[in-house]
Amino acid sequence: MHDIVLVVVLLSACTAIGLPLCLLLPKERFGARFAIAPPIGFGLYAMGGTVLYLWGVRPWISMAAMATTGLVIWTVFWLRTRPRRLPPPSKPGMALGAGIAAVITICLLPGWTGGFQFRVFQANVYDHMTYLAGTVTFRNLDY
């Protein structure tokens, strides 16, 4: 249960952080502006959180402050340009939501089914970077 709460909080905060920047993209050319808000928000949080951490602000406080700022900016933008009626949900939007839910479920399944020994590998986010660096090294220097 903690895994789901963590994923929902992180995705929500990153979406709130990246949403104002995604709204600057032209609506005619970028139909899925909201779909790219979480990765853009995560990048902004990585940069802003690092700077705020150097100034002595704790990471969870910087995430909350940046997400709140993003939501305030988005609310102001939405109140200025909101449509009179909300359109019905589209099939591509529902398919995108189902795909996101499926990917999150697949990523969390090893920890749920395998127990603690698989959760350790799930928590080591730098492990893939070690393997990639090793493959590049072994490709160039085979001795």
Image (spheres, rainbow, N blue to C red):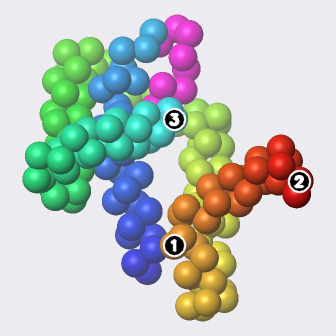
First in residue order: circle 1 vs circle 3:
3
Residue drawn at (57%, 47%), measured in percent from left and top?
97
Mark 1 vs 2: CB contact within 8 A: no
- Disc assigned to residue 14: none
Residue 34: where, in percent of width, then height?
Answer: 45, 32
Considering only vertical position in the picture, is 55 above or below 101? above
Q: Which residue is mark 2?
A: 142
Q: Answer with the quarter of the image where residue 116 lies.
A: bottom right
Q: Nearer the viewer, mark 1 or mark 2?
A: 2
Q: Residues within 10 Å of mark 1 (few under 14, many from 20)?
A: few
Asked whether 43 or 81 is in front, the reply is 43
Instruction: Judge from the rendering whether residue 29 lies leftward or rightward of residue 135; answer left or right.
Output: left
**Spatial CA span between label 2 and label 3:** 42 Å
Region in magenta: 27-34
Q: Answer with the quarter of the image where residue 61 lies.
A: bottom left
Q: Residue furthest left?
A: 56
Find out whether residue 30 is within the magenta segment.
yes
Asked whether 123 or 29 is in front, the reply is 123
Residue 39: where, in percent of width, then height?
Answer: 47, 39
Residue drawn at (16%, 24%), measured in percent from left and top?
76
Q: Which residue is mark 3?
A: 35
Residue type at mark 3? Ala
Secondary structure predominantly adopted by residues drawn in magenta = loop
**Spatial CA span between label 1 and label 2:** 30 Å
Where the C terminus falls, by quadrant?
bottom right
Q: Residues within 10 Å of mark 3 (few under 14, many from 20)?
A: some
Q: Which residue is mark 1?
A: 123
Circle 3: element type: helix
Residue 3: where, in percent of width, then height?
Answer: 45, 74
